[in-house]
Amino acid sequence: MKVLNIVAAACLAGSLFFSCATTGKVEPKKVEKPETVTFASQDGIPVTADLYMAYDKKAPLILLCHRANWSRGEYLEIAPKLNLLGFNAIAIDQRSGKTKNDVDNATKKAAEEAGKGTSYLDAIQDIQAAIDYASKLSKKKIILWGSSYSSSLGFMLAKSNSDKIAAYLAFSPGEYFKDLGKSDNWVAMQAEEINVPVFVTSRPSEQKDAQPIFDAIENEDKTYFVPQTDSKHGSQALYEATEGNEASWQAVEAFLNRFSK
């Protein structure tokens, strides 16, 4: 178990985004404009996603899930940087969301047009369908990544899909589902039995929400990174405009490095 509040010693500032170059296996490259695709959710609603496939299927793949009221546009800046670390990526629209970076949530629109629910919990089926779809894009187990409410849902999904998921990254998890009938510790209960490596991060002000979930994880292969700056909620902690984003990136890279080989 690792709890980090400083930059991981394994990552030097000058090495960020160039780890795959040192392996001698692939030349770092990125997708500037993703390919947009759709696939069916478990109830038939089309899930819209952006593919950042910089490498062939031998490369590891990260499935990126967005926060509340946002869309796959949350990852327009982040996904190309993950490419440079040696990963393919897919960013999805869950039906509980809206718009980010001028990218409208197409899955939300499709669900509303079909008269389907669009709560946080309704989005579980979209993420499950995305796990199944993404698993066909890589010869390796995929890496799941959640932001805010999707980071909380991800504990349950990572636990139930351990045959498809190699690791899980949760940005600003919390017990977000009490108004939807779940208990005060429902997410922590899901986290208990997760058996893949886990990376958790949150703003210092969010530690009271994330720490109990992190502590509940019985698997010792877990890391909790708390930046020294106030940072931002969810994956926005990695945006270039966010104070202290470099430290957050270095912690993420340190965790992902073992999966980039």
Image (cartoon, rainbow, N blue to C red):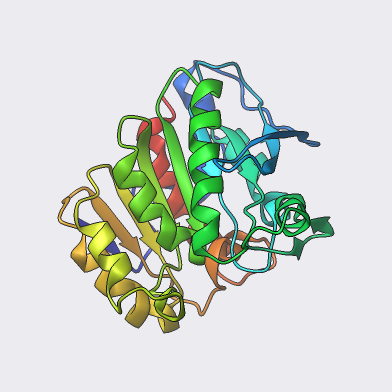
**Residue 25 in view in this figure:** yes
Q: Quadrant of residue 152?
A: bottom left
Q: Nearer the viewer, residue 22 or 237?
A: 237
Q: Is residue 49 above or below residue 186?
A: above
Question: In the image, 243: left or right of 171?
Answer: right
Relative vertical location of residue 22 with respect to residue 155 in this rendering, above or below: above
Q: Position of residue 113 (x, y in %)?
A: 78, 56
Viewer can see residue 86: no
Q: Quarter of the image for the N terminus: give it.
A: bottom left
Q: Position of residue 169 (x, y in %)?
A: 42, 51
Outermost residue, right side: 102
Q: Residue at x 24, y 49 (%)?
A: 194
Which of the 4 image quadrants contains residue 67?
A: bottom right
Instruction: Name the residue located 43 percent from the left edge and 73 percent from the top edge.
Output: 177
Q: Residue 247: x and y, percent?
A: 48, 61
At 63% from the left edge and 69% from the top edge, which residue is drawn? 242
In this rendered view, identify the residue nearer to me: 97 or 59: 97
Instruction: State the residue in front, 129 or 255.
Output: 129
Position of the C terminus, as image quadrant, is: top left
Q: Residue furthest front?
A: 115
Q: Position of residue 154 (x, y in %)?
A: 41, 53
Residue 190 placement, left or right of 34: left
